[in-house]
Amino acid sequence: MPLSHAVVAAAGTWRRAVAGAVVALVPLAHAAADVSGARWERQLEQDGVTATVSIEPLTADGLQGGAPARVRVTLSSTADGSALPRLLPGVWFDAQERAGAEGGDAAACQRRVARYARGSGINPQALVDLNGYDVLALNADASISVLDPRTQFAGKTSLRATLPLPGPGFDWAATADDRLLWVTVPGSRAVVLADLAALRSLQTITLPGRPGRVRVEPGGARAWVGVLAAEGEAQRGGVAVVEASAPYRQQWLPLSGRGHVEMAFDPAGWVALTQRDAGEVVFVDPTTLQVAHRERLDAAGAMPLSVVFDAAARRFVVAEARGGALWVFDHRGRLQDRLNLAPGIGPMAVSPDGRWLLVANPAAHQVDVIDLPAWRHAHRVPVSGRPFDIGMTGAYAYVRALDSEAVSLIALASLAAAPRVQPIAMGERAPGLTPQLPLASQLVPMPDGTGSFVASPGDNAVYFYMEGMNAAAGSVSARGHEVRAVRVARRGLREVAPGVHEMQVELPDTPHMVVALATESPRTRQCTALALKPAPTAAGEGWQLAWEQFPVQHGRPLSVRVHGVAVESLPAALHLRLFQPGAAALQLVAHADGGGRYSAEVPELADGLWYVHPQTPAGARTPWGYVSFMRGAATR
């Protein structure tokens, strides 16, 4: 199965049943009154679920095309008003063909949502898609590939952008909203800050030494970068704490050792730091960046390799490899307990519900499972091939091994009794066959938790696995690059509180906007509309094109509007190219109707999907993009 098809099938719970019940609770003809820039809100109800959709302007200009706005979708119980968490809504903004065109047509709303959910490279998305995410591939050739997994053209996954780096990346970390990405580049002694919303690098910050691990502190204001001391240099290693906004100031926190640094954060307290060769845990107060406490590991030649924060008990757990023990410290750095396992332990991961701690032991070819609330060793799960990387979804732990092409899935629900393990092949070559692997993980869950992406450096591919299947659902090659690690970056709604989904968007430049909303449980398809104020035109940035009407039925013309330019500068006609995939194109001429509006008479067209490519006038600085519409039985 092609990767894009697999991702469309599982990209969100609302995508699984487009043919479900459809409700249009606010007729478009009545909902599109001029809002005059004020806050807009609609409440939709069905089957015991209330969905409140609001759009709030973020500037004094109000709700107008091209202006920023905050979108919020709140899902609650109609009966008692309680929040409904983890119910992912699908939301899209698009142009309405003409004011009041759809009225309360529920069937048209269902077709609209179905088209959005099937989005691919030959079927463009709505003007604004609040549900998407990108797959980021960290490449060996000093770059990051930004891929849209739902977009496919000629069998290739769409490359949205390539972010250059000053050298091969080693580790990366993003802010909670996936807006900013930090990437360490050891060869350049630097960390790179990238803007994932704009898909561009913001700054390269030079560091005192070779960086390794990077983590973003709670709140996202700063990144903590572990720095190794170079051979022959007098300076020891430490941590560079770098601000996420200009001028990107950094503060240096020296440590006693020279080796690799790991870190874990208490969101309400201290930061725990470990160094591989220092044999101690250092607790830092992030408000002052002063060392608040140090605790030596009472073991000969202690080698702490990883540290995690147990949020439920508010404690830090440190894995010490040489002696093979877990050391537990409370949030003030006081030693609480020690749990002996076996020498060689290293990477750790906590299950999303906070119940289980999984500890990989490459030397013993096993994963130890710790019951965190009971603080006891629950299981020793054999995983052949030197397990070194652990990823989590709500249902499974994904374990990657250096000497095996398979990923071992451990069912979290089975850990209360006997562990259930299922190996899934991800390519043909084991990760250990690739030299100089980075620290960044090869495993990342999908945003909705129904599967994972797995990087296979030996196969130079990213595999997609849908939970419940016996094999990978698809893969994509990093064409022209050598993939080393993978992560996802959401560019859609985020659940900021139970049942509350929110994000900041730029409103589309269209006079009549449709808001489409879909949920899976219960299955609903709801469409409403509002009128937006026209976008202002900055000096030299005119020639904005707005689509007003599409020929979705016979006899209906194709109408557009050009604004942002003086009337006397407008041409007498616009040239448009109209075509269906695989068929010859039609050349249309849209004649001026006055006031910047143009219309073109359209001959009889076949039913189905059509594309319109406008020819950009010579005076426009930015090329006009193409659009699509559905003709006839599948009327948009």
Image (cartoon, rainbow, N blue to C red):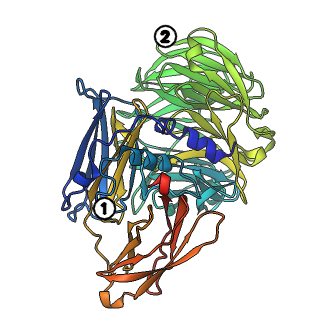
Q: Amino acid at mark 2?
A: Ala
Which corner quadrant holds the C terminus? bottom left
Query: Which is more N-terminal, label 1 or label 2?
Result: 2
* Left or right: where 118 falls relative to 80: right
**Viewer-side residue, 316 vs 607:** 607
How many C-alpha atoms fall within 10 Å of the one at disc 1: few (<14), some, or many (≥20)? many
Query: In this orientation, which residue lies closer to the viewer: 448 or 216?
Result: 448
Q: Residue visible at 30% across and 51% down?
A: 103
Left or right of 181, for residue 157? right
Q: Position of residue 542 (x, y in %)?
A: 36, 80
- The nearer-to-camera label among 2 and 1 is 1
> What's the mark number on residue 374?
2
Q: Residue at x 42, y 65 (%)?
A: 550
- Displayed quadrant of residue 391: top right
According to the picture, the residue beneath numbered tag 1 turns out to be 512
- The reply, left or right, for residue 348 in relation to residue 541 is right
SS at badge 2: loop
Q: Quadrant of the N terminus?
A: top right
Crowdedness of circle 2 by 10 Å Cα count: few (<14), some, many (20+)? few
Along the line of sight, which residue is nearer the eye, 571 or 210? 571
Left or right: 314 in relation to 363 = left
